[in-house]
Structures are given as structure tokens and as C-alpha cells.
Image (spheres, coloured by chain):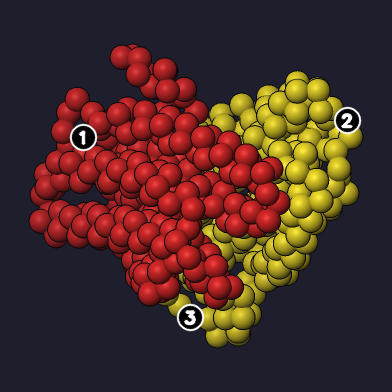
Chain colours: A yellow, B red
Amino acid sequence: MENIKIGHHISGKFNNELEDMRNKVLTMGGLVEQQIKRAVTAFSTADLEMAEQVIKLDDQVDTLEIAIDHECMQILALRQPAAFDLRLLVTAIKIVNELERVGDLAERIAKMAIQLSETGSNNRHEHYFELVHMADLVENMLHGALNVFARMNVEDVTLIMDMDENVDREYASIIRQLITRMMEDQRNITRMLDVLWVARALERIGDRACNICEHLVYMVKGEDVRHLTQAELKMPKKQNLSN
Amino acid sequence: MENIKIGHHISGKFNNELEDMRNKVLTMGGLVEQQIKRAVTAFSTADLEMAEQVIKLDDQVDTLEIAIDHECMQILALRQPAAFDLRLLVTAIKIVNELERVGDLAERIAKMAIQLSETGSNNRHEHYFELVHMADLVENMLHGALNVFARMNVEDVTLIMDMDENVDREYASIIRQLITRMMEDQRNITRMLDVLWVARALERIGDRACNICEHLVYMVKGEDVRHLTQAELKMPKKQNLSN
């Protein structure tokens, strides 16, 4: 699979613009990764200070989203790119949108941690290990997707998308456990619904990492792989819908 | 507020391309509106046939998403538009992405209806009225957002975004009722979690209608209103972050 490099333009300034935009996307991705890790720790350990950090990080993430979007639109208008450059810019706009939504999910987990802490339920949370494990999985997925974007090499995409099956399995297992706990004692219900919500948010983060992968395949190969099944994705001859 | 019209280009073919793309977005929006209405009815009345229709509609929605995306990319590459036309095309790409996710949520509600029906729980569902009412609200929001796109007039945007507060209130009220029902009888828990999931999906559809509104304000006015509060949105002088 070809490894596409930025830096082939006659205009050095154009190269720099693309490189700068790409670095900003990676910075934004790094911030969102931090948000996920800290949000789940804050929720699981009722760490108020860490929850506040996640919310502060979200302001930076939002500012970066608008800045990158703006930069991409400026380059589209002024450089009028075609082929790979055009796909790169439109993909970057889509990726920052996904990243911003991941940041929002992390922020909501952090806000839930604060709420729990305020209502006095600030003891170490049950289901800590399951949630942290699930968070590790989706963080790895996001990290992998950002690596694909950094290296412009989509070889690892199916590996990352396979990980989503594990995430879905973990999620289903947590839900089963929570339902059992709720049935055992209805005083657990409100608390268990909070845990359920966090698990659901993590599952959605995994989905968004998959969305990013799909956008990246389109960017690098010019093939639209959305709405294909995992099995179709792995077939050597892909259906070319969009180039 | 100015009412922008497509059709001012010297090239009649360019006008037609934009008009065609815009019509496709509106067609896709219409399909997604149908999906929401039918999915909630299918879930609430355990109507297997209607649930199947929602799933079939989703194939059409997915096909349209890819077609519109492709069309926008082609126009970006060949016409190299600037200013409003550039914003229109990038916004269309963002809107079809939001619409496709709404379609997915409707599809998942339909699949849940089928699952319930298969497990024999095919009696008329409790909380029918609350869910149908919430579905009406989010459908109206989406319909309003698509009207804004059709007329290119963002005057109604704050009205639509205000409706989201009602949706959030309805959602909170449903959650409270569900928790009470779960506490009364733990045999209700699994069933109530399904209703909770549908309510949550509807709440997210409302959020996506708001996202579409934000994209539209940017398209028409060139102002980025993401991450502003509702109050800031209503201020006559908006912070111009992205133009």
C-alpha cells in the first residue's frame, strides 16, 4: 500500500500550510486522548480536580476545531487543490468534527464525576476496572487512527476496526453485569445508570475512532468504505464507490 | 437577514450542479424524517413490518450520503469555488454526515423493535405517548433545519435550537419515570432500559438537528457559532470566529 507524503508541491508555502494543519489535527487528537484517560479516572476515583482538567482541556479542543476548520477552508479557497490534497483537507474537516465529539463525550463523563462527587457519592466507584479497561481499548483505537493520519498509511486500519468488536463485547458484558446488580438491589439503580452511561459513551468513542479510519481510507485511497461490513473491508478488491 | 439564492453564476451548468446537490440533500433529509417517525411507531406498537421499512430506508439514505459527498468533492475539484459556494459545499458534506447518523439512530430503534418482537414482548409498549411526543419534537427540529437549508434563511435557527431545551426536559422527565418504574419492580429493568435507550437516541437526534443549524449559520453568514451558548447565539452582535 502506498505511503503518501506531503511535501511534493512546487509551492513551499502550500506544503507548509498543509503540514501546519496536519500538526494541529495531531495536537488536537493528543488532547482528546488525554481527555478520555483523565475523564474515566476522574469518574472512577471521584477525582474532582482531574474532572476540572478535562473540562478545561475541552476549551482548547473546541478552539483548535474552529482554527483547523478555518485553516482548511482558507486553503480550499486560496489554493484550489485537487485529488489527494482536496481529499486531505475535506478529511481533516471531518476528523476534527469526530475528535470534537469525542472530547464532548469525555467532558460529559467528567461532569458526571463532579455531580457524583457533589451528591456525596465520592467513594471509589464500582466497575472501576471494567471501565478503565474499556477506556484503554478505545484510547488505543483513537491513537491508532491518529497514527494512520500521521503516517498516511492505512495498512493498520482493519486492525483498529477489529478492536471495535472487543469494545462492543466489553460493553455488552458491562451492561449484563449492571442489569444483574440493579435487579439484586434497586437502591443501585441510579448509580448503575451512571456507570451504564459512561460505558455507552466509551462505546461511542470506539465508533468514532472507526469513523475516522473510514475517512482516512477515503483520503489515502480515494475509496469510500463507509457502509461496508468488516468482512467486505478485508476483501482484497474493494468496491470503489467514490473516486 | 439576507436571503441568499443559488443561481447567480455565469455558468448555468454550475448552477444546475449546485441545485441538484441541494435537492439531493433535501431528499435525504425527507427520508431520514420518515425513518424517525416510523422507527418510534414500530418500537412503540411492536410493528415488525414498519421496522423493516426503516431498515430498508437506511440503505437509500446511505447511498444518498455517498452520492452527495462524491458530487460535492467533484464540484470542489472542478469548479474551485470560493466564498459562499465553498461554504455551501463543505456545509452540505457536514449536513449529510449528520443526517446519516440520524438515520443510523432510527435504524437502531427499528432493530430494537424487531428484537423485542422476537423475544415475544410484542405487546403495545409502555411510555408510548412520551416517546411519540419526543419523536414529534425532534422531527420538527430536523424539519425546521432542512427548511432553513432549503430557503437559505437562518432567521428560524434560534427557534429551532430553543426547541432542544424542550427535548432535554422531556428526556429528563422520561428518565425520572423510568427510574421510578425500575425501583418499583426489578422485573421492569430490562424493558425500561430499552425505553431509556430510545429516549436517549431521540435526544441525540435533537442534538444533531442543532448541529445542522450551527453548520447552516456558518454557511449563510460565514460565522462560526459552534461552542457559543444559547444566550450568546441570541445576541445581536455575534463573535465572528471563522470568517
Amino acid bearing label 2: Asn
Label ID, residue A239: 3
User: Element under label 1?
Assistant: loop
Q: CA distance from mark 3 to mark 1?
A: 39 Å
Label ID, residue A71: none
Question: Would you name the residue on which mark 1 appears?
Answer: B153
Q: Nearer the viewer, mark 3 or mark 1?
A: 1
Residue A51 visible? The answer is no
Q: Relative to A180, does residue B241 appear above or below in the rendering?
A: above
Question: Would you name the residue on which mark 2 appears?
Answer: A123
Q: Residues within 10 Å of mark 3 (few under 14, many from 20)?
A: few
Residue A1 visible? The answer is yes
Q: Are marks 2 and 1 on the same chain?
A: no
Q: Quadrant of residue A151?
A: bottom right
Q: Relative to B220, does residue B120 appear above or below in the rendering?
A: below
Q: Nearer the viewer, mark 2 or mark 1?
A: 2
> Disc 3 is attached to a residue of which chain?
A
Q: Residues within 10 Å of mark 2 (few under 14, many from 20)?
A: few
Residue B39: image x %, image y %? 40, 61
Instruction: From the viewer's perspective, tell me whether residue B206 is left or right of residue A27.
Output: left
Circles 2 and 1: CB atoms closer than 8 Å: no
Amino acid bearing label 3: Gln
Residue A66: image x %, image y %? 50, 33
The quadrant in which the N terminus of chain A is found is bottom right
Circles 2 and 3: CB atoms closer than 8 Å: no
> Disc 1 is attached to a residue of which chain?
B
| Disc with the residue nearer the chain's start (2 vs 3) | 2
Q: CA distance from mark 2 to mark 1?
A: 51 Å
Q: Quadrant of residue A128?
A: top right
Q: Residue at x 40, y 47 (%)?
A: B129
Q: Nearer the viewer, residue A131 or B195?
A: B195
Q: Residues within 10 Å of mark 1 (few under 14, many from 20)?
A: some
